[in-house]
Amino acid sequence: FRTMAGKVKWVTDIEKSVLINNFEKRGWIQVAENEDWNFYWMSVQTIRNVFSVETGYRLSDDQIVNHFPNHYELTRKDLMVKNIKRYRKELEKEGSPLAEKDENGKYIYLDFVPVTFMLPADYNLFVEEFRKNPSSTWIMKPCGKAQGKGIFLINKLSQIKKWSRDSKTSSFVSQSSKEAYVISLYINNPLLIGGKKFDLRLYVLVSTYRPLRCYMYKLGFCRFCTVKYTPSTSELDNMFVHLTNVAIQKHGDDYNHIHGGKWTVSNLRLYLESTRGKEVTNKLFDEIHWIIVQSLKAVAPVMNNDKHCFECYGYDIIIDDKLKPWLIEVNASPSLTSSTANDRILKYNLINDTLNIAVPNGEIPDCKWNKSPPKEVLGNYEVLYDEEMAQSDGPERDLRGRSGQSTGAKGSRARDLGKPVLTTWK
Amino acid sequence: AMAEPESGLSLTIARVVQRLQGSSLHSQLERQARVSLHKPEIKLESLKEDIKDFLKTSGWEKKLQNAVYSELNVFPSLCHPAAPPEHIKEPLAYMRKAQGSWEKRILKSLNSMCTELSIPLAQKRPASEQKELLNKWNEMGTDEPDLSLFRPVYAPKDFLEVLMNLRNPNYENGEQPSFRNHLGLIQVPLKVKDISELKEDFSELGLNIGQLGIDDSAQVPPEFFENEHVRVGQKVLAEQDSAAAQQYVRQGCPTALRADLWALILNISNQPEDILYYEQLKSNVIQHNLLVDSLIYKDVKLTASNDDYYFVFEDYLYQVLLCFSRDTSVLEHFTYSSATPPKSYIQGKLGMEEYAVFYPPNGVIPFHGFSMYVAPLCFLYHEPSKLYQIFREMYVRFFFRLHSISSHPSGIVSLCLLFETLLQTHLPQLFYHLREIGAQPLRISFKWMVRAFSGYLATDQLLLLWDRILGYNSLEILAVLAAAVFAFRAVNLMEVTSLAAAEAVLADLSTLKVMPLLQIFLFATVT
């Protein structure tokens, strides 16, 4: 017998049906922000307020929110790169085999982010790198924006003169974070399918950073550019060719509202296995899982592991024509807008499975719980990495701890990476 | 009177020899034999034997075997020495007549569209247009020609109406229609197999035999079947044996081996001369514009471009189909197809045979959904000339039977009759119910079979199905699957009360697993 008092009270400032339908189907009760609430699905602006020094408030044990206070350590382009660089240096210092470098000084296992610099801070360093490969293309991204806004490509130093001038002025006024940019080496040899460029969107749920426990959603998707990819310089300005964000593609002439230019990850796997073979395909997917876990490990030490928090990230990954995956960015608020019917179903199920893990049994939460959901509630998620399990078990752990990591045809098969780093997964 | 076995065999041998004579394989074998004369192991006194041994050890005998095997697969095996050519195309006169009328209708429709739109059937492109097309060859999908005035020449449902009206004038069925008679839409007395014959033919799909599509699921340890099956597949590929490959794929192809196994069975090796031939076709496309090109564009835009799985490959489809229309080597298949390529006349020379050309050059007029025959192959082959050859071979071996009227066991008429008979025999209650509410099952399943299920099943499932088409060298599995789908959804179908509702129950096949469905229907249903 449940009284109204026993039902979860929810708030959101994101008016999306995939969210609201999920709350309502659980019989949860909508309340206002200033009332007593148990679950708040908030936008990133709101989380800033909740945890800010001035306006913030203490959350009680029966309150859960969908962001970590300083998620931007992972989700801001410049901070993500900074944290990964720091993590690599630390591993190098402690002599970890993970930080091994090859004869060219490149990290063998941790080179998964394209060379990136902050502007204007690293302008001179960038120029040095640029001159090593003057014919390369670089992508400029504003640190604080999403959905492909404000992004442009350059292949000449003159195109970013503005950032150099500012850094030289002696009365240097610190730029507001809105105007800071990152500049990354553009992957100009992306894997093309049907002659088209695409990127991967994968959803990763983190329930705790220390110990790290994260889940990968099995139903990720590829986003194809509607216009044929061409590396020719004359097309640099055509954003439809280069950016795979759906927000941008939606306005192209060829956008299709049935499939939305999206492919399932299982289609990608079938295509790659059929045309490239099973071993290289397995290796690719293993590497994708690897880089996601490494990125989370990189920010784990600096994350505020507030027990009231969980977070569902949208990972953007590009695969190059040598089947190497590159981490492009991580989104704290992956879009919940649906561009097609299939999309709506996918996002609805994503939220459903996320809530099943974050709010056990759909009941009023107790943030002190051990955040270890039973296998049955995972839905389309599978365990990507469980630090606790990794540390507690013995040599057997290798198989079990990595179980379910691959989102391929055999979800629960352990795979042999064939790298010496296999044992250091623990 | 049936031909005696010996003369039948010698006839077959003679035919195969004639087909292979003058082929590039023939000249390669001759060259190899001549080159071998320089080898020390070839001795004058035992010349013939030594050369034969050499050809065996160097793998050339295997290539010849594969070519012979390929010929035997494609051509009907026994034919009376006195049989006229039209009997090889189609032995039954009334079928030939029906196919002829159907072709006349299609051609009339094409010609009237042509006249209405004042577009010639074929036209040389001006130089500027040629240059533009060449530049855009890899992205024809971004072109947006105005296709609003074009309509598909016909759709599967038009074809079904024709098949429904087929009658054998020599067959007098004096009985009143009753529950004993065939109550489906197809009313011609062709012989189709029953379940016990199908069980025998498809014995490798039995319950005790490992299958990909069933025994490779996540819950089954790979040591039970999958690993060994993959090992055998790799061995078959190493041996380059067509016949062994054909037997092997009956249990399904491992995804990583499928492209090579299909190529081996279809005897496609993508030699330099094949690539050259494809490039030649491409230059034909650049130089001349055909009316059917617009039909192809329209079809792709209507079907594959909107498909969740295949939209990615839109540009490849143009590259294959535009070339296909111009490929006169496809005309060869008309010797064993009931169809005849349409003829057209140079403007102003109507009826004058010396000004007749086949139109389109390959004699195949595309219909609505035609591009879906090519689309699944894009998951396997990303090199245009190889993709092209695989598709062409699939077409002249299998797909052409799905849209021509014939008595062949793999022809669409037999498939429809097989489907209806299986349903009526094994799910009589369902059959009668659907018939009562005006939802004849064939009206729903026809489009699946005409397209060989492309665009209806998930791609990985479709490929498992097409593995078996190649393995058994027959399209009958399409009819069996169609019946199995109805069996699977029987409970829901019993509750519907209209054709529209029945269509809705069967609208989405994308979650179906074909091998369990087939296995259960063939081997686990009480007959």
Image (tube, coloured by chain):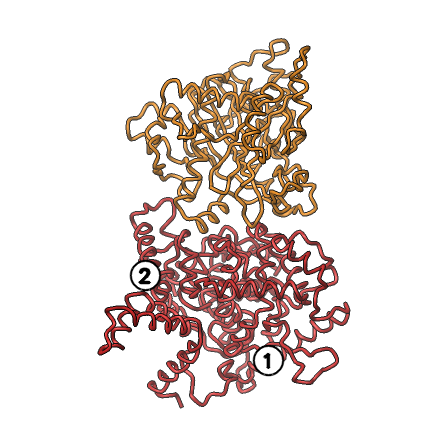
Chain colours: A orange, B red
Q: Identify which residue, A219 or A150, lies in the foreground.
A: A150
| Any part of residue B178 in sight | no
Q: Position of residue A220 (x, y in %)?
A: 52, 39
Q: Is A45 placed above or below A337 here?
A: above
Q: Is A360 placed above or below B145 here?
A: above
Q: Identify which residue, A404 or B125, lies in the foreground.
A: B125
Subunit under mark 1: B
Label 2: few (<14), some (14–19) or many (≥20) C-alpha neighbours in 10 Å: few
Judge from the rendering whether residue A321 lies leftward or rightward of residue B7; answer left or right.
right
The residues bearing labels 1 and 2 have C-alpha atoms spaced at a distance of: 45 Å
- The secondary structure type at the circle numbered 2 is helix
Q: Quadrant of residue B369?
A: bottom right
Kindly identify which residue carries mark 1: B98
Judge from the rendering whether residue B33 lies leftward or rightward of residue A336; answer left or right.
left
Q: Position of residue A274 (x, y in %)?
A: 44, 51
The tag on residue B239 is 2
Judge from the rendering whether residue B443 lies leftward or rightward of residue A272; answer left or right.
right
Residue depth check, mark 1 versus mark 2: number of the one nearer the observer: 2
Q: Identify which residue, A413 or B427, lies in the foreground.
A: A413
Subunit under mark 2: B
| Any part of residue B483 in sight | yes
Name the amino acid type tagged 1. Ala
Q: Position of residue B484 (x, y in %)?
A: 46, 60
Q: Is A415 placed above or below B392 here?
A: above
